[in-house]
Each structure stands twice: as C-alpha cells, then as structure tokens.
Image (cartoon, grey):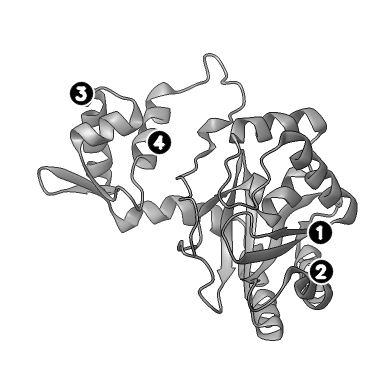
C-alpha cells in the first residue's frame, strides 16, 4: 500500500495552559527525554536525545543518568535505549482501568463474528491512543499495539471522540493537528472536517474510508459512561478490497454497536 508516512504524533501539538508555580519543569523535561525514543529512534546518542528533546547536552545527560539509575534507560557507553521497565508507566494507566481486562472477551467475540480486527482507544489531545487491540489479519503497513498513537482527525475512533468536545475546543484541536493528506482520500479542509465530526456526533458512530491508509476502512462506536458521554471508542478495521465501506456499515455496524453497549454497561 502506498501511503504518505505517518509521523510520530505526540500530544505536544495541543496542550492546555501550563499552571504557574505548580509546573515542575524538570519533570516535564524528563518526559520529553522519554518521548524522544521511538520505533525510528530506539537507540540514541546523548547529542541525539538532546536535539530531539530540545535540551542542552548537560540537561539531557542529567536526565538520562537519572533514568538509568532508576532502571528505565540502559547505555552501552555511547548509545542510550529504553528498558522494558518503561512499560510500567503505561501499564499503570491500564491497570487503573480494569474495564479493559473485562472488555477483551467482548472484543474477541466480535472479532470471531466479523473476522476483522477490533481496537479500543481513548483521546489524548490531537491523537487517539490504543488501549486494547485484538487483531485478525495484518491490515496496515504500520504496526499497532497498546500505546500506539494515530491522528484523531482521520480515524474513525478519533472523530467519534472529538465529537464529545464543544465547538471551540474541537476547532482548536483540529487546527493544532495540522491535517495532512496521508492518502488521496484524507479530508484536510477544516469546514469538511467539522462537518464529518458533526455527523459522527449525530449518528453516534463513524466510518472512515481510506483516509489514514490506502485500502483501510474502519468503523467506530462509542463506549459511554453512565452520563452517556463517550470516554473511549471501539472500532473494526478491514481492507477495502475484501470488505467495502458499504458492506462494513451494513453487516458489521450492528454487532459493533452491541459490543460497545456491552462494554459501556461494565463502566
């Protein structure tokens, strides 16, 4: 599949105002150093970490040595890399929300029924972050797993979760996303994007056809809390040459909505 490479998105493109004397700058810098590591840069020199995180070499070195002492970073003397212990930070979030352990059987049953991959995600600033995934076929050129980020503006789960925002907040996040044409189908016009999100808000589900990657079709339903507010989204993804958008909507939307309702009742 020929696509425009998906950039390594972070939530830094959109952030709420920073509090004054409650903002711990050294802690924030430490997180920047951790986020400088990625699939494209799993091992970095001190200079590379400093450049990627916007710090001086001295500042980056202090943070890296602190992380190394705590066991989150390892070094061969020249290059630094994250250790598996860094997963503790992400799994702390997942373990604080046991809903996902209970949701997994529901998702697995849905995958068995529709024979397509199923994922759950939450909104983080301009991105969606995967919190659960049950794959069936490899349908994307990029690897997805728990913790993976994708831009919200061109994904079915993203648009559905953006629909929970008020109009001003929605526009601010879409503008901060700087929408790019990842495929020839990607919607980047602000007015059209707003209309797409408004449609998702009205119908309480969302279908995105080949906007994230050529040949990829996905449809999403909301996972709602007791107040009826979407706190996460559930989706089914498939290949357009195997399952058209029309067929996906007609045959897979009903079981997807039912699975989302089952998970919602667990909240």
Quadrant where the C terminus is found in the figure: bottom right
- Is residue 84 shown left or right of residue 258? left
How many badges with numbers are in the image?
4
In three-dimensional space, the C-alpha distance between marks 2 and 4, rounded to whole angstroms, equals 37 Å
Rendering quarter of residue 263:
bottom right
Q: Secondary structure at mark 2?
A: helix
Residue with the mark numbered 1: 205
| Position of residue 167 measured from the top left corner of the image (x, y, whole percent) | 81, 32
Residue at image mark 2: 257
Q: Secondary structure at mark 3?
A: helix
Question: Which image quadrant is residue 177 in?
Answer: top right
Pointer 3 residue: 58
Residue count near mark 1 (Cα–Cα under 10 Å), binned few <14, some 14–19, many ≥20: many
10 Å crowding of disc 3: few (<14), some (14-19), many (20+):
few
The residue drawn where x is 77% and y is 40% is 192
Compared across the picture, whether 239 is left or right of 208 comes to left
Image point (86%, 52%), residue name: 228
Circles 1, 2 touching at the beta carbon (< 8 Å):
yes
Query: Marks 2 and 4: which is nearer the front?
Result: 2
Is residue 86 visible in the rendered structure shown here? yes
Residue that badge 4 annotates? 31
From this view, report whether residue 265 is shown above or below residue 170.
below
Kindly state the secondary structure of the residue where label 4 is placed. helix
Percent coordinates x, y for residue 260 in the rendering: 77, 67
Disc 3 vs disc 1: Cβ atoms closer than 8 Å?
A: no
Gap between marks 3 and 1 measured at Cα: 49 Å
Label located before the other in sequence (3 or 4): 4
Q: Residue at x 34, y 26 (%)?
A: 54
């Amino acid at each position: 599949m020929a696509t425009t490479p998906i950039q390594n998105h972070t939530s830094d493109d959109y952030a709420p105002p920073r509090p004054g004397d409650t903002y711990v700058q050294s802690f924030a810098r430490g997180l920047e150093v951790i986020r400088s590591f990625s699939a494209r840069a799993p091992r970095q020199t001190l200079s590379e970490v400093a450049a990627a995180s916007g710090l001086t070499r001295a500042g980056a070195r202090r943070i890296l040595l602190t992380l190394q002492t705590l066991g989150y970073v390892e070094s061969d003397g020249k290059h630094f890399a994250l250790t598996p212990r860094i997963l503790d930070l992400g799994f702390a979030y997942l373990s604080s929300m046991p809903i996902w352990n209970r949701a997994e059987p529901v998702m697995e049953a849905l995958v068995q029924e529709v024979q397509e991959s199923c994922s759950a995600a939450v909104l983080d600033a301009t991105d969606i972050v995967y919190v659960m995934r049950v794959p069936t076929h490899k349908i994307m050129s990029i690897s997805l797993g728990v913790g993976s980020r994708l831009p919200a503006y061109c994904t079915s789960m993203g648009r559905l979760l953006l629909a929970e925002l008020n109009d001003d907040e929605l526009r601010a996040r879409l503008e901060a996303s700087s929408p790019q044409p990842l495929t020839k189908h990607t919607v980047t016009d602000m007015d059209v994007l707003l209309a797409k999100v408004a449609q998702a808000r009205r119908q309480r589900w969302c279908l995105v056809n080949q906007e994230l990657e050529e040949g990829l079709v996905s449809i999403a339903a909301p996972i709602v809390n007791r107040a009826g507010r979407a706190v996460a989204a559930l989706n089914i993804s498939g290949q357009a040459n195997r399952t058209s958008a029309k067929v996906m909507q007609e045959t897979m939307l009903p079981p997807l909505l039912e699975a989302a309702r089952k998970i919602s009742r667990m909240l």
